[in-house]
Amino acid sequence: MAARGTGLLRSLLSRCSSPGPGLARCASSLPPPGAWSSLARLPHRDLYRLSVTDPDRFWGSAAADRLRWEEPFHRVRDCDLRAGKIRWFLGGKINVSVNCLDVNVEKHPDRVALIWERDEPGTEVKVTYRELLETTCRLANALKSRGIQKGDRVAVYMPVSPLAVAAMLACARIGAVHTVVFAGFSAEALAGRIQDAQCKAVVTFNQGVRGGRLLELKATVDAAVKRCPTVQHVFVAQRTETPAVMGPLDVPLEEVMSCQPPRCPPEPLDSEAMLFLLYTSGSTGFPKGLVHSQAGYLLYASLTHQYVFDHQDGDVFGCMADVGWITGHSYVVYGPLSNGATTVLFESTPVYPDPGRYWETVQRLSISQFYAAPTALRLLLKYDQSFVKKYDRSSLRTLGSVGEPINHEAWHWFHSVVGDGRCPLVDTWWQTETGGVCIAPRPAEDGAAIVPAMAMRPFFGIQPELMGEKGERLAGNGVGGALCISQPWPGMARGIYGDQQRFLDAYFKPYPGCYFTGDGALRSQDGFYQITGRMDDVINVSGHRLGTAEIEDVLDEHPEVPESAVIGFPHEIKGEVPFAFVVLKDYSSSSSSSSSSVVVLQQLRELVSTKIARYAVPEHFLVVKRLPKTRSGKIMRRILRKVAMGTTGDLGDVSTLDDPSVVDEVIEAHEQHRKRQEGEKKESSSSPSL
Ligand code: PRX
């Protein structure tokens, strides 16, 4: 088999045998129809090699044969990473909803597309491909009936649910651009995103349900849209019995959908037309609205879903993410549906009604692939193993982890307790910007080893590079540096909505000719990649990405806070939590424990919760007189991190500090704070519980 594959590769490459010019000639001609099925039979090593040495052949074949085109593309790519120019499948016209729905309805209309695993166990709802197409078309027609057109932006403020999926696909059907906003974000955060994207409509529910609690979604939308003059309509669906209070902008979604035809002609869209915007935090300023386009994104989501997770016909794919994050976009919606999978929409929490919920769901729904965040695993492994063991998990074939580094304890627990040591566990590294998984242990040669807690291998077409401090490329193994990717791939984001300069500055300027990920990584002696974490001021709280600057901006709005600095601080379950150093105006009467500062700190917690979201509220506050700054006024966060960690023995180079005595002040404040906390802990453990 291997020999046959190698021979096939040789014959494919022989068509481009002369180096340089030959490759260039090949690159401009399109692969013959059906080429993908021959390529897909190659051994992994050869297919990976082809994907990076002849990306036009690899991606051109995959796109032509795996996707349905309204009009074929005439050029595979036109990219220049130095200029941030990324264009794939030029001249092609496509509709993503056709690829996710119509093609499956033709093949297997009654196959279940979605299993909505609702909050209450045992109340799941199944939706077939035929039903999902009809619902999507009715929703698309409802949007059209209120004037939503190709290119308009539509905010979706809904937890994961069939209607949220239909809203995304309905936008895709008519060429509107969806921007899903995680339903845990506050009214202010929602308003900021709607304003930035200039959304014409919002789609929401009256309420949400999670972990037995209600979320007041419509009320949040009402508060947000007051500040959003571009919004002309708010489509309101019913998740609970409680009727929503309807205002002049509000449209009862299900009622309008019921009067619409169940067919809606798909809009043929340019490969590079916008499919969606998704806001994510950067190290500075307001979250960035990352732009993903049609064909390249879909192909990448589809291929990674199949190969990383070993998707096979008839599988039930269980990605626990919410549609408000990129993981939900690529591995709850677009990847699985484009492959005709049955995908699980998990509305609840890992501990509702008890810590066996995930595994009871695996048993009841016969889940084949289970994909979750390390934060949930760290939480669950604290409970007795019987919560896992009492359920039948024999349907599981692949386990996956995403969103943050997975520690060894969580990896081994997931692998041996949940997977009984028999399922490959893939630690998948990727980002909102990358569209899909870029580094993961699979695909690989049959039976290739998986190193615990390591992302390991680049996906097809991904060429990782590690860069040194002077911007030099680090060759060989056993090195560590800034993780970059030196070749474009179809799934990468195309821009930041309304701010192409920021896109260039953040990703393409730091290492010219490469995409810079913002993460650091090591390349092991065996040539595998280990992610070491963010190199910028972005932190990861329970797998949710946050810019420390975003939190500081909110803290600094308080009249008593002239300045603040936020860093990421390790947390056993959440991975990281925000730690805020705040300077108060009237420092003389303040310490973290004085009554006036206790009031201010509580106000700060509320402020962050209402301006961003609950998960962004700093877990630790330390009131300080001044912050350590360089002579040019830049806060030295490196020092704050060491103070917070209590590792001030080696502070490194402090020669650029404007006033080095600030460091002693901050250390002293931290010491006092620590002693007080210890005292409080002792007191509470010695007082009788009532
Ligand atoms: O720091 C990396 C971390 O999450 C960041 C991307 O966050 P976001 O855009 O929200 O996407 C999360 C879901 C794909 C990365 O820059 N990250 C993601 N996956 C891993 C990870 N860190 C370590 N290991 C991972 N597997």
Image (cartoon, grey):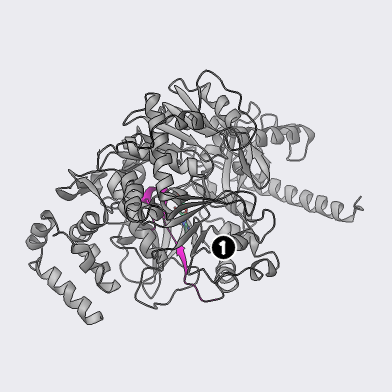
x, y percent for residue 97:
34, 44
- Give the dominant element type of the magenta stretch: helix, strand or loop: loop
Q: Residue at x 37, y 28 (%)?
A: 144
- Asked where in the image residue 40 lies, by quadrant, the reply is bottom left
Q: Is residue 322 left or right of residue 214?
A: left
Q: Nearer the viewer, residue 618 or 75?
A: 75
Q: What type is the residue that disc 1 sits on?
A: Val
In-image side of 28 versus 288 (left or right): left
> Can residue 548 be spotted in the picture?
yes
Asked where in the image residue 443 lies, by quadrant, the reply is bottom left
Judging by the rendered image, the residue that carries numbered circle 1 is 362
Residue 210, percent from left and from top: 63, 45
Question: Is 142 situated above or below 429?
Answer: above
- Total marks placed: 1
Residue closest to the eye, 262 or 195: 262
Q: Is residue 242 left or right of residue 63?
A: right
Q: Residue furthest top?
A: 248
Relative image position of residue 689 (x, y in whole percent): 90, 52
Q: Quadrant of the N terminus?
A: bottom left
| The magenta stretch spans residue 435 | yes
**Structural crowding at the residue carrying mark 1, measured as other residues with C-alpha within 10 Å and reported as few (<14), some (14–19) or many (≥20):** many
> In the figure, 30 relative to 599: above or below?
below
| 9 versus 289 height, above or below | below
Residue 111 on image: x %, y %: 42, 56
Residues in magenta, as a range: 421-438
Quarter assignment of residue 557:
top right
Q: Report the front residue among 287 and 69.
A: 69
Instruction: Tell me if residue 438 can be seen.
Output: no
Residue 317 part of the magenta segment: no
